[in-house]
Image (cartoon, rainbow, N blue to C red):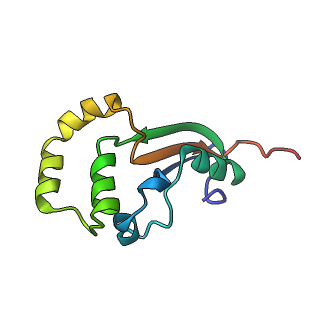
Amino acid sequence: MYRALEPGGNAIILVPRGQWLYGSLDRVLEHVKRYSPTDLSDSCARAGFDIERLISFNRVGVLPWFLNGRILRKTRFGKFQLKIYDSLVWLWRIVDRLIPLPGLSVICIARKPTTAAIS
């Protein structure tokens, strides 16, 4: 990815967050691991990127993901669960930042430096 970007170009990387949440849902989605913001930031920095911003989001989804993927070991969400979740997206957007949990996902906005660092 780094080589494909022009100098000054941005990479937007979305990964699942929180290894403690790893379970059956992750395996079905072929997630190899879940990341912490530090893991993601360090990986991007090692690749040569400057980290612009890390964004954690979807705190609302943490408990359903944990219940379905870790406790119940389901391989998908039920239609009723998805219908409720989808119908209340407007509410989740308001409530999400008030929930004192880490998000279900993390985004890293990283920039390829315009000049190569001199070692």
Direction right: furthest residue: 119
Count the numbered circles shown: 0
Q: Is any atom of residue 6 visible in this view?
A: no
Which residue is at the front of the view, 24 or 17? 24
Which residue occupies the extreme front position in the image? Answer: 71
Residue found 46% across the figure and 46% down from its top: 106
Determine whether 29 is above or below 17 in the image.
below
Residue 21 is left or right of residue 86, and the answer is: right
Image quadrant occupied by the N terminus = bottom right
Q: Is residue 81 left or right of residue 97?
A: left
x and y percentages locating residue 40 in the rendered image: 58, 50
**Location of residue 78 with respect to 116 vertically, above or below:** below
Q: Position of residue 103 (x, y in %)?
A: 40, 42
User: Residue 4's spot in the image, x, y percent?
Assistant: 62, 59
Residue occupying the point 33% across, 32% down? 99
Placement of 42 over or under 79, stated as above or below: above
Q: Position of residue 88 (x, y in %)?
A: 15, 41
Q: Please give left or right for residue 35 compared with residue 8 in the image.
A: left
Taking depth in this image into account, of 45 and 116 the one nearest to the observer is: 45
Can you tell which quarter of the image residue 93 is in?
Answer: top left
Seen at 42% across and 70% down, the residue is: 30
Quick one: 66 or 50, which is closer to the camera?
66
- Rendered residue at 16%/62% (across/down): 78
Q: Is residue 106 visible?
A: yes
The residue nearer to you, when weighing 61 against 3, is 61
